[in-house]
Image (cartoon, grey):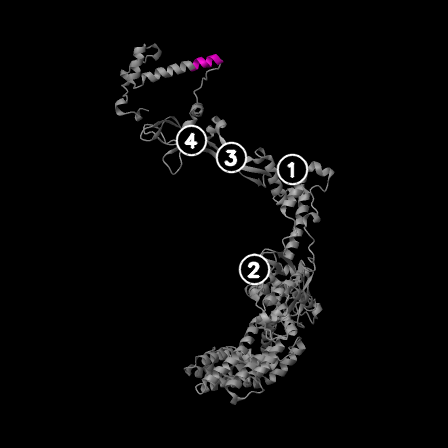
């Protein structure tokens, strides 16, 4: 294009009318031809040189008998021909640099006079390299890197990198890299490694496909030895996880040697291996099958199904158990898979015992965590742990109490030392010696996992209760008549339907409630428990009446404590529905309600106090143990209680007034007492524990009669503090350990308090009276020694 020429050299075309006739160049004389070239700014000498070269090329073509191409050469053909003689003049331009990298480590720039219509690509070839102020390339043309491979294949230097097994392709491949005079022509090209190094390719094939189990998935069907070997290896690995030893399964080198000895040397890929195996296995059906003896270094003594069972029974249900030896992994140790509907029926006491094969290690870890004096009595620990595991791990003892409690009793019996439960430092016991729980729904999806069963129950307990109730399907129907425990069973089909309908239960609730709401005992006998069949196993459910406001319903719970609390409230509502008129009169005529409400204000409202007084009155009038379980007993209980309800309600109100008046006095005294921070803080804590919002319903009725005395003792203690603060501090220091161990035990038992613990609870209050307000007296002798004796009975 003339546009790239200097302005002086651009030709201006004459008008068409004035254009002379064109004369062919071959008819011009030499002088005329040279004059024409000069007029068009063409170098005459270079044209002569080119005509000589062209003539010589024609002569060579004629001598070889080649035919001259009638079509013009393409850009690629032309530059491929040029590259054959200019491979040393190629260049590659990095993205971050303006210069080109050339052959043998040189760098050059594009010559300023190299006028191109567009920027060349990253690869170029130069007609010549000229060095002036710096090295320039002239006569530049863009090329493709694959042309270099075609023209200069004999000059390429190739490297094969990263040989590896490709499962999908079933062969060993590598990545090839080629350079020409130091310039990378291509990199990362996938090539079959067997052509490069057949021996190494065969070794990689055996190690990855056969030893490491990275064979294509369809091989297990076509090559039966693979599935058999993997199954056998998995069994041996399971023994390692159970025994927590890494020396049962032979190492991979021995398995490699087994395959290396039998696989032919020329088999380097999956295709050849399949062909060889099909032919050889016809004569040798057990070809390449490993045996147990070939896989095991030694027999894993003691690793039996009874020591490490696959099924662990928790909450009346068989749960799958799996084992893993991987310190640091959340699943390290034994993991049991618990269905959601049975979660609330799983107890910590059973889970502390793990499985028989792990009991000895846990006992040893617990003994090791003891203080030095009791621990020294069991040295050497391994032998003592083995003996104690055999002694304590009998079926009649496992699960009836916690392992720590059982071991504590045994340590006390053998050492005659006052070892406490807190002396076992559970944080020193390795995590794998605590059972890991995996909670799943009916579809097997994991909902939660961890070693803290209490935390899982707190997180998923409500869902577990809902799943259990859907499973139970409320088999106590209207008009069903009297049923015995054995009669109340749910068929497996009904259970499956109920479980599948769990998500629909919320939508169907109104209709279901309407069908099963009762205002009288018309539902037959209500058993204490019911059996629910599921998957060939039997779950235990606990039916309860549920307070629904203007009626009661029946639900089945998975925890007896929850069912008992709900059932008492439901029975109370059912009784109230039978005496509506009498109850309405009582609500309006509770004596001194306004006066009580003023003192109750820090705790709650007048309506809450009224409801609490009526609930306690109904409980005392109608619901003394044992509770009714059928319609006749219930009707008799209603008739008996109706006559004495008003008298009992007045008695409850009088006691509530007395307690609340003393409560108000104690609150004022605590607020007004200055200069006694420890005593005030302790009295405040005592008051909060003694008189919570629901104090009338929370405390046993016989104990409520003593509340006024306990509250008076708080006031007397603070009155006497100024006279002898040292005595108060001394008694408080003596009292605190007693209370702390009690509340710690309550926390450990998650609020489940038995009769002896209830006795201990109120003896602590009596001890406070004897320490700080002796003039009020106690109904029975009380001392720290008596508390220690009762404490020993609780621990035993």
4 vs 2, front mark: 4
Q: Secondary structure at mark 3?
A: strand
Q: Which residue is mark 1?
A: 273
- Residue ID for mark 3: 159
- Compare marks 4 and 2 and give the one earlier in the sequence: 4
Q: Is residue 226 left or right of residue 195?
A: right
- The answer for how far apart the CA atoms under marks 3 and 2 are is 51 Å
Q: CA distance from mark 3 to mark 1?
A: 27 Å
User: Nearer the viewer's eye, disc 1 or disc 4?
Assistant: 4
Pointer 4 with pointer 2, Cβ within 8 A: no
Q: Report whether residue 435 is seen.
A: no
Q: Which residue is mark 4?
A: 104
Residue 362 placement (x, y as % from top left): 62, 64
Q: Earlier in the sequence, mark 3 or mark 1?
A: 3
Packing grade of label 1 (10 A; few <14, some 14-19, many >=20) is: some
Disc 1 + disc 2, Cβ < 8 Å: no
Residue with the most extreme right position? 283
Residue range of the region highlighted in magenta in the rendering: 57-64
Q: Indicate the quadrant containing the C terminus: top left, top right, bottom left or bottom right.
A: bottom right
In the rendered image, which residue does mark 2 sit on? 448
Kindly report the distance in space between the C-alpha atoms of the residues bearing marks 3 and 4: 18 Å
**Vertical relation: 453 (above or below) 419:** above
**Badge 1 vs badge 4, beta-carbon distance below 8 Å:** no
Give the CA separation, mark 1 to mark 2. Answer: 45 Å
């Amino acid at each position: 294009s003339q546009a790239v020429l200097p302005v002086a050299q651009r030709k201006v075309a004459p008008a068409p009318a004035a254009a002379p006739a064109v004369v062919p160049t071959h008819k011009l004389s030499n002088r005329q031809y040279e004059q024409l070239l000069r007029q068009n700014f063409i170098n005459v000498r270079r044209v002569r040189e080119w005509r000589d070269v062209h003539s010589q090329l024609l002569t060579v073509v004629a001598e070889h008998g080649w035919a001259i191409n009638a079509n013009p050469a393409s850009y690629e053909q032309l530059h491929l021909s040029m590259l054959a003689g200019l491979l040393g003049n190629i260049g590659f331009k990095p993205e971050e640099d303006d210069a080109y990298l050339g052959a043998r480590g040189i760098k050059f720039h594009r010559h300023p006079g190299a006028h191109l219509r567009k920027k060349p690509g990253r690869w170029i070839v130069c007609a010549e390299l000229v060095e002036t102020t710096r090295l320039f390339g002239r006569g530049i043309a863009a090329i493709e890197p694959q042309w270099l491979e075609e023209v200069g294949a004999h000059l390429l230097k190739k490297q094969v990198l990263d040989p590896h097994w490709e499962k999908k392709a079933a062969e060993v491949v590598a990545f090839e890299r080629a350079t020409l005079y130091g310039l990378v022509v291509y990199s990362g090209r996938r090539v079959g490694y067997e052509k490069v190094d057949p021996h190494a390719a065969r070794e990689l094939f055996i190690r990855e496909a056969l030893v490491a189990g990275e064979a294509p998935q369809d091989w297990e069907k076509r090559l039966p030895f693979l599935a058999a070997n993997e199954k056998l290896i998995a069994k041996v690995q399971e023994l390692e996880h159970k025994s927590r030893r890494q020396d049962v399964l032979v190492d991979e080198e021995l398995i490699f040697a087994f395959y290396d000895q039998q696989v032919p040397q020329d088999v380097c890929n999956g295709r050849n291996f399949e062909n060889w195996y099909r032919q050889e296995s016809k004569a040798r059906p057990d070809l390449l099958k490993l045996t147990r003896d070939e896989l095991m270094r030694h027999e894993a003594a003691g690793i039996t199904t009874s020591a490490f069972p696959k099924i662990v029974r928790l909450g009346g249900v068989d749960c799958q158990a799996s084992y893993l030896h991987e310190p640091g992994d959340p699943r390290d140790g034994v993991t049991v898979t618990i269905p959601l509907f049975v979660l609330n029926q799983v107890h910590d006491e059973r889970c502390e015992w793990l499985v028989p094969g792990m009991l000895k290690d846990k006992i040893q870890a617990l003994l090791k965590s003891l203080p030095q004096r009791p621990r020294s009595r069991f040295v050497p620990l391994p032998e003592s742990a083995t003996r104690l595991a055999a002694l304590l791990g009998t079926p009649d003892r496992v699960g009836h109490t916690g392992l720590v409690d059982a071991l504590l009793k045994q340590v006390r019996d053998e050492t005659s030392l006052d070892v406490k439960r807190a002396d076992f430092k559970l944080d020193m016991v390795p995590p794998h010696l605590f059972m890991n729980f995996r909670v799943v729904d009916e579809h097997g999806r994991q909902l939660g996992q961890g070693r803290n069963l209490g935390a899982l129950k707190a997180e998923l307990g409500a869902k577990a209760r809902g799943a259990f109730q859907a499973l139970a399907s409320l088999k106590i129907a209207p008009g069903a008549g009297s049923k015995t425990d054995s009669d109340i069973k749910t068929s497996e089909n009904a259970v499956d339907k109920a479980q599948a309908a769990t998500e629909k239960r919320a939508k169907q609730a109104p209709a279901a409630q309407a069908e099963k709401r009762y205002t009288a005992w018309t539902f037959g006998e209500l058993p204490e428990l019911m059996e629910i069949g599921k998957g060939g196993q039997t779950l235990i459910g606990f039916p309860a009446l549920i307070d629904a406001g203007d009626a009661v319903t029946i639900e089945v719970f998975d925890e007896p404590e929850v069912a008992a609390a709900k059932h008492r409230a439901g029975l109370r509502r059912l009784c109230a529905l039978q005496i509506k008129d009498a109850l309405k009169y009582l609500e309006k005529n509770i004596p001194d309600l306004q006066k009580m409400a003023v003192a109750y204000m820090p705790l709650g409202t007048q309506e809450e106090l009224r409801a609490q007084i009526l609930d306690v009155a109904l409980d005392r009038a109608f619901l003394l143990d044992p509770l009714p379980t059928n319609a006749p007993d219930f009707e008799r209980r209603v008739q008996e209680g109706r006559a004495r309800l008003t008298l009992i309600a007045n008695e409850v109100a009088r006691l509530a007034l007395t307690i609340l008046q003393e409560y108000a006095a104690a609150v004022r005294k605590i607020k007004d007492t200055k200069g006694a921070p420890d005593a005030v803080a302790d009295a405040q804590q005592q008051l909060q524990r003694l008189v919570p919002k629901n104090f009338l319903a929370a405390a046993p009725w016989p104990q409520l009669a003593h509340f006024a005395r306990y509250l008076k003792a708080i006031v007397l203690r603070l009155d006497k503090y100024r006279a002898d603060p040292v005595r108060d501090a001394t008694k408080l220091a003596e009292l605190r350990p007693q209370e702390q161990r009690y509340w710690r035990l309550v926390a450990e038992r998650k609020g489940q308090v038995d009769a002896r613990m209830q006795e201990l609870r109120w003896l602590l209050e009596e001890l406070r009276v004897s320490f700080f307000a002796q003039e009020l007296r106690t109904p029975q002798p009380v001392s720290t020694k008596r508390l220690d004796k009762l404490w020993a009975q609780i621990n035993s």
